[in-house]
Image (spheres, grey):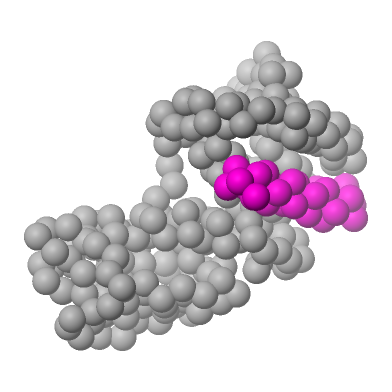
């Protein structure tokens, strides 16, 4: 199976998981606030609808939100307009629109030729292929599914293929965190243990001023940091600060370096 087809399978799996989760919710549950500032459970679903409808060519809302206090960039402003346009709707009606929009999106993606996924397009990370954009969409949808699940205390999909994809993408930023942001000294090594449900052990050494992931260490690590994959995702996506989840991470060795590293893990804008 082609890589982009695997990505699509992950996307459809996560969208299906979102439907199943939200189909069981009461209107009161749809209004529960999540860790996304200003966004309820329903708002997270509205955000996904807006993005996927836009990418399907169904157009964006002409509605304009009057409150943009949580907005940090143009993409955030666009998201807020989509979310606010559905705030007067019931959760049940938002879910109905979600189902219709995702059915159209799935039909489009399944019928698209391979060239659609290999052509260059603009993504949130700059110019890349549509296949890479789909990879980002899996992460975004899975992260928002987890936002909803944490808010409602309904855990699930924490060890799915989309969870693994998300953790892998977020791990790409760790050398920047360890080297540039946490200022790990030249020649020093650290190890980051992600203990599960998605398990990773990542060794990073600063070589010629650049933090690099290495297969094995030639020196003892000056610091080791451990947390589960759910905590890692919360930190890396800015859902929680290091202090808010202090009981969920552990540092051995250079404590100050470990604290700087945890505090710098958020790479979302």
Relative to 126, residue 238 above or below: below
Q: Which quadrant of the view contains residue 131?
A: top right
Q: Give the residues drawn in magenta, as a range.
A: 1-30
Q: Residue at x 85, y 54 (%)?
A: 20
Left or right: where does residue 224 sit relative to residue 170?
A: left
x then y, percent, for residue 54: 66, 23
Left or right side of 64 for 86: right
Q: Nearer the viewer, residue 30 or 225?
A: 225
Q: Main secondary structure of the magenta part?
A: helix
| Rendered position, 134 above or below 16 | above
Q: Is residue 94 above or below residue 156?
A: above
For residue 205, which quarter of the picture?
bottom left
Q: Is residue 9 magenta?
A: yes
User: Residue 90: x percent and y percent?
Assistant: 87, 37
Is residue 267 left or right of 222 when viewed as pictured?
right
Q: Is residue 38 magenta?
A: no
Foreground residue, 83 or 225? Answer: 225
Q: Residue at x 42, y 69 (%)?
A: 243
Q: Is residue 190 left or right of residue 200?
A: left
Taking depth in this image into account, of 74 and 215 the one nearest to the observer is: 215
What residue do we see at 75% from left, 52% from top?
A: 13
Q: Tell which residue pokes out farthest to the front in this image.
A: 1
Q: Do we see residue 43 in this rendering?
A: no
Residue 268 in view in this figure = yes
């Amino acid at each position: 199976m082609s890589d982009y087809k695997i990505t699509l399978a992950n996307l459809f799996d996560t969208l299906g998981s979102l439907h199943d989760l939200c189909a069981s919710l009461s209107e009161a549950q749809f209004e529960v606030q999540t860790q996304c500032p200003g966004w309820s459970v329903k708002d997270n679903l509205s955000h996904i609808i807006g993005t996927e409808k836009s990418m399907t060519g169904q157009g964006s809302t002409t509605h304009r939100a009057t409150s943009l206090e949580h907005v940090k960039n143009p993409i955030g402003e666009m998201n807020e307009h989509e979310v606010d346009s559905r705030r007067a709707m019931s959760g049940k009606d938002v879910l109905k629109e979600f189902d219709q929009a995702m059915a159209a999106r799935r039909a489009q993606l399944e019928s698209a030729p391979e060239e659609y996924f290999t052509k260059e397009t603009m993504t949130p990370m700059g110019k890349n292929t549509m296949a890479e954009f789909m990879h980002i969409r899996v992460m975004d949808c899975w992260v928002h599914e987890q936002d909803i699940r944490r808010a409602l205390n309904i855990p699930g999909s924490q060890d799915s293929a989309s969870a693994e994809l998300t953790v892998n993408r977020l791990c790409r930023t760790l050398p920047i965190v360890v080297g540039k942001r946490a200022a790990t000294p030249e020649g020093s090594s650290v190890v980051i243990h992600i203990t599960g449900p998605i398990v990773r052990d990542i060794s990073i050494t600063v070589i010629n001023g650049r933090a690099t992931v290495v297969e094995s260490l030639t020196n003892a690590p000056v610091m080791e940091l451990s947390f589960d994959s759910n905590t890692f995702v919360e930190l890396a996506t800015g859902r929680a600060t290091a202090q808010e989840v202090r009981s969920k991470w552990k540092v051995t060795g250079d404590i100050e370096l470990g604290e700087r590293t945890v505090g710098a893990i958020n790479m979302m804008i």
